[in-house]
Image: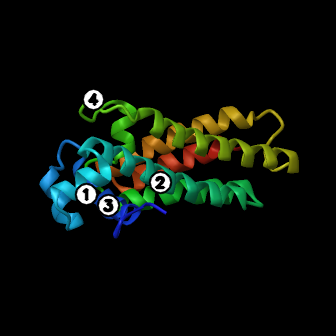
Amino acid sequence: MGRNGDFDVDHAVDRAMDLFWRRGCTGTSLQDLLDVLSIGSLGFYAAFGSKEQFYRRALERCSALQAEDLVKILEHATEIRPAVRQVLAAVIEGDRADPSPGSPGAGEVTGNDAGLSPAERAVAALRKVESALAGALDRAKARGDLPPGKDPVELARFLTTFVQGLRILGRARLGRSFVEDALAVAMRALD
């Protein structure tokens, strides 16, 4: 899958995601990509069309991988609070490990990336996480792990929004205690 002759397109996208993650689309030159991928410009254009098309593909892959990880945690959850905390903590730890200026997904959703238009793809990944959260919260409510007055869809929307806020806070380097306090408040929404 994802091969173009002897060139593994998916592997190339994986290699470039980090570059786009750190620099964004506008901060990454075509030459940067050619160097990272060890490919010539003709091969690049044949495989991807343009830098912007390649960026969209990298954004899709990044969003899909992040959403898949979070969905797996939630689908296998037998207790909702530890699962939600694990999802939120994974976001915090991921961004603390790499507090670079911005994720492609965050830039796309907020429209901060050179007028490119893959915002719908980033929103689709957010909706996937929101749907997984709503499903997990609905199952928790059926088990009695969530108070009867809580709406799983509303909570899922809040937590999805909160996750995006955590991503921004993680990059702002506001300190672990600030983020942990915010996480504790979010967790109380499940009470």
| Quadrant containing the C terminus in the rendered view | top right
- Identify the mark nearer the N-term, 2 or 1: 1
| Pointers 2 and 3 in contact (C-beta within 8 Å) | no
Q: Position of residue 99 (x, y in %)?
A: 30, 56
- Identify the mark nearer the N-term, 1 or 3: 1
Question: Given the image, on which type of amino acid does mark 2 rest?
Answer: Glu
Q: Secondary structure at mark 2?
A: helix
Taking the image as shown, residue 157 lies to the left or right of residue 17, namely: right
- Identify the mark nearer the N-term, 4 or 2: 4
- The residue that appears at 70% across and 34% down in the rendered structure is 153
Front of the two marks 2 and 1: 1
- Identify the mark nearer the N-term, 4 or 1: 1
Separation (CA) of disc 4 from disc 3:
25 Å
Q: Nearer the viewer, residue 105 or 134?
A: 105
Question: Given the image, on which type of amino acid does mark 3 rest?
Answer: Asp
- The residue that appears at 40% across and 49% down in the rendered structure is 178
Question: Given the image, on which type of amino acid does mark 4 rest?
Answer: Gly
Q: Secondary structure at mark 3?
A: loop
Labelled disc at residue 98? 3
**Residue beneath disc 2:** 180
Q: Secondary structure at mark 1?
A: helix
**Residue beneath disc 1:** 19
- Identify the mark nearer the N-term, 2 or 3: 3
**Residue beneath disc 4:** 115
- Identify the mark nearer the N-term, 4 or 3: 3
| Pointers 1 and 3 in contact (C-beta within 8 Å) | no
Question: Given the image, on which type of amino acid does mark 1 rest?
Answer: Leu
